[in-house]
Amino acid sequence: MPRVYVVTSSPVIKVLHSVDQAVGPGCPNERRDVMLVQFFLRAASKPAGGLPAV
């Protein structure tokens, strides 16, 4: 099960995410872990500010 850790030190809030099992070929591939990794891969592939990639 993925975990979310919130670390606060005013005015900065840091959010850390972790997965229980490795994700990928030959790994356990727990559904919730896979979904979290896919979410971050999609988010990382989008350009910042909503501008189209060149």
Image: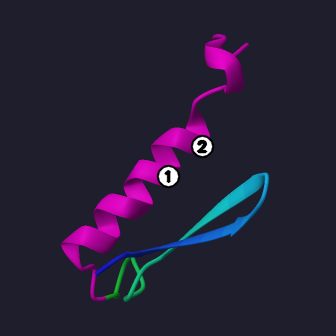
Magenta stretch containing residue 5, yes or no?
no
SS label for mark 2: helix
Q: Quadrant of the C terminus?
A: top right
Marks 2 & 1, CB-CB < 8 Å contact: yes
Q: Tell me where residue 50 appears, x and y as whole percent.
A: 61, 16
Prevailing secondary structure of the magenta residues: helix
Toward the viewer: 20 or 15?
15
Which residue occupies 38% across, 88% down?
A: 20
For badge 2, the amino acid type reads Ala
How dense is the environment of label 2, judged by Cα within 10 Å: few (below 14), some, or many (20 and up)? few
Toward the viewer: 18 or 45?
18
Q: Tell me where residue 32 appears, x and y as whole percent.
A: 25, 70
Magenta stretch containing residue 40, yes or no?
yes
Quadrant hosting residue 8: bottom right
Distance from disc 2 to disc 1, alpha carbons, whole Å, reads 6 Å
Q: Which mark is residue 13?
A: none
Which residue occupies 36% across, 76% down?
A: 2
Numbered range of the magenta stretch: 28-54
For badge 1, the amino acid type reads Phe
Task: Identify the residue position indicated by label 2 in the image.
Answer: 44
Toward the viewer: 44 or 13?
13
Q: Tell me where residue 34 appears, x and y as whole percent.
A: 32, 67
Which residue occupies 37% across, 78% down?
A: 25
Toward the viewer: 11 or 3?
11
Quadrant hosting residue 4: bottom left
Task: Identify the residue position indicated by label 1 in the image.
Answer: 40
Which residue occupies 49% across, 52% down?
A: 40
SS label for mark 1: helix
Position above or below: 36 against 41: below
Q: Residue furthest left?
A: 31
Position above or below: 45 against 23: above
Q: Tell me where residue 7 appears, x and y as whole percent.
A: 65, 71
